[in-house]
Amino acid sequence: MTRIKSLEGVHNFRHFHGYDGLDGARVKDGLYRSGHFSRASAPDWDHIGGLGIQVVADLRKPRERTNEPSNWPDPIAPRVLASDKGDTGEPPHLRFLRTGVHTTEGVRDYMLSAYRRIPMEAGNMDVYREAYRALATGDAEAGFLVHCAAGKDRTGIFCAIILDELGVDADTIVADYEMTNQAVDFDAIIPRIRERILADYGQAMEPAMMRTFLGVDGDYLRQAFEVMGGVYHYVREHLGISEHERDALRARWLTG
């Protein structure tokens, strides 16, 4: 069964459960990830509403949430975790589009720098911390979803953290992260985004560079892990997660 669910108005929707974890146990069903929901259709909501999602971690900044609101309909109405920190100044990706070096190497360098920045941003850490604890305490027992704008960078790092904490092996974690490159129809979205970048910033980014900008690469995730000092260090020292909470996460999300 594919992990990817094609929806009409939501990009990159998929689950990240079912993997082999610690001591041969399996990651329990109920873990989902995606891009934003502002263009979700009625059939999309019908599908999402059937998943039992109780807690949603929205990693977007306030400006992003205002510009593209999720508008969760009744009766879904999950508890939404979000942060109001870090919304001052021009977003880094927009500054790069306006002033950056638009070569394949320049785009890759920007993406690596983004993965050094994302884990250490206060707003991301706040949501990562709350989401981890929601998973550990049982608040999200029936279903949990994490998303950002595209569901690849901020979201990808959090999913990798949780899978690592559940004992999923490194190659599988990277493969799950890189699944964005299969889940997103780049041929469909690149012309539209390229046209908008040209209109807004006067920059004509070539399609190959756009794929680097919009896609993912295992090296990006490895860069984040390096900056974090490893998942264990990051979870304990930066998120402030206790050993009791780590044990509770495994007890709730590993089965068999």
Image (spheres, helix red, strand yellow):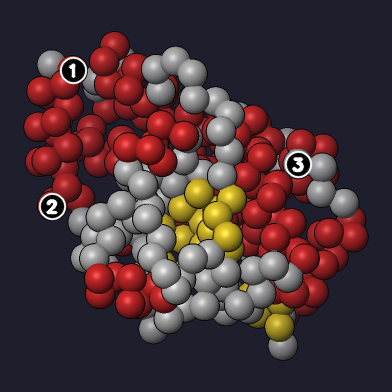
User: Which of the pair 191/106 is nearer the observer?
Assistant: 191
Q: Residue furthest top?
A: 99
> Residue sitting at 89 percent across and 56 percent down?
243
Q: Earlier in the sequence, mark 2 or mark 3?
A: 2
Report the residue marked by disc 1.
201
Q: Residues within 10 Å of mark 1 (few under 14, many from 20)?
A: some
SS at circle 2:
helix
Name the side, left or right, on which 34 lies relative to 189: right
Q: Is residue 23 found left or right of 142 in the rendered image?
A: right
Q: Which residue is mark 3?
A: 239
Viewer-proximal residue, 256 or 9?
Answer: 9
Q: Position of residue 4 (x, y in %)?
A: 35, 70
Q: Amino acid at mark 2?
A: Ala
Can you say whether 95 is above or below 242 in the image? above
Tell me the kind of residue under disc 1: Tyr
Coordinates of residue 92 in the picture (x, y in percent): 41, 22
- Residue most extreme to the front: 74
Q: Given the image, on which type of amino acid does mark 3 rest?
A: Leu
**In terms of sequence position, does the residue under pointer 2 or pointer 1 come before the other?**
2
* Residue 60 vs residue 246, the one in the foreground: 60
Give the answer, above or below, for where 203 lies relative to 82. Answer: above
- Which of the two discs, 1 and 3, labels the residue nearer the N terminus? 1
| Location of the N terminus (image quadrant) | bottom left
Q: Quadrant of residue 140?
A: bottom right
- Determine the secondary structure under disc 3: loop
Q: Quadrant of residue 122?
A: top right
Q: Residue at x 34, y 17 (%)?
A: 95
Q: Residue at x 26, y 15 (%)?
A: 98
